[in-house]
Image (spheres, rainbow, N blue to C red):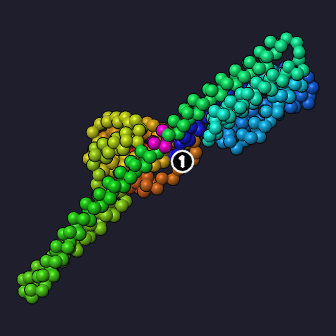
Amino acid sequence: MDAEPARGQLRKLNLTMFLPLLAVAGTISVAAYARSWWEAVVLGVGVVATLVCFTRWAAGEVLRVALPCLVITAVVWPFAVLVVGSSTAFFGISCVGSYVVPQLPRHRIAAAAALTAYVAVMGAARLLVSHEDIPGVLFQFVLVPTGVTVAVIGLMFPNKGFYDIVEELEEARERDAELAVIRERVRFASDLHDIQGHTLHVVKLKAALAQKLVDSNNGNDIERAKQELREIHTLVSDTITQTKELAYAQRRLNLSAELENARNLFEAAGIHVRVNREADVDQDAGELLGQVLRETTTNILRHAQATRVRITLTASSITIVNDGAQQTPLPELRGLAALEQRVTANGGELTVEQHNGQFLTAAAIRSEAQENR
């Protein structure tokens, strides 16, 4: 149930909102100033380079196309100034620069200053071919392009900081989820220790006692030693059974304790939890429902990017719904598959569904009271 990271979702939102605007603005600029097909081609190449750079920025891979896009738009701007007379073609170099400069590993301020100076100098080159209305030329080709470039690049720096914060929050959340899984493993190890530690200690004492009784060569002691050995055999057999039950999540569970544990794990991972208890759970169904809750909790923490979980309990059923499910085929969850066999064997039904970004796990158990009605 891996969900797409929030950073990718935000970038896709930007792509959906701003790519059409850039495309329309570029098309209008080309149509307004190009006087021949070859001028339209040159200006159009600058627009395409801008759109490619924006698309790669939205995918988080802008540095892969930074150099060619910067070179193309840097050439188109003086061409537009000196040949076409377009004062709007600067938007290509300004946009590409605003996507690239904040992503640089170092010297970002120097790069921003150099880019701004380039836009201003190339705009001032218009004075080489137009000597009329010098103030108007400076305003149209220097002041406006330079000001817009500074503003756009300046806005992209905090934008970069925002994405960095989102990424850090995602990493922190992943670490919390991993920690929650580790806690679950520690709890499992603790249960295993409780089962086997006590048994091994008792077996050790009884084996030592049996050895002592056998060495005494007393008839009564021999019989008692046999009894001790029989108890050791029974104790070991019970321990093996309990260990298997623990390994396959079949050990008797307390649903209320599992519910509290799930709440604590989710809250530790930064996931909002809401629990609705519509009725007291039947004792017959409580153990299996607790196992479903435990397995689902582990799956959410390991595989989802959930922010909300809703748990609903009735007398004989449990429903867990979480967000953060990706739009892909339903994943294989072996733990729930094993539980489904047990639920079905007890006359119940386990349902697993994924729809519209939500993952639902529901189990309904037929209790003895329902069967007697």
Residue at 58% in and 45% down: 328
Left or right? Give the position of 222 relative to 65.
left
Amino acid type of disc 1? Leu
Residue 107 visible in the snapshot: yes
Name the one closer to the observer, 223 or 58. Answer: 58
Q: Above or below — where is 313 with respect to 286?
A: above
Left or right? Give the position of 90 relative to 1.
right
Residue at 70% in and 22% down: 148
Disc count in the image? 1
Q: Position of residue 56 (x, y in %)?
A: 69, 39
Left or right? Give the position of 217 relative to 67.
left
Q: Above or below — where is 59 with respect to 198?
A: above
Q: Is residue 203 magenta?
A: no
Q: Above or below — where is 257 with respect to 17?
A: below
- Residue position marked by numbered label 1 in the rendering: 330
In magenta, the rendered stretch is 169-173
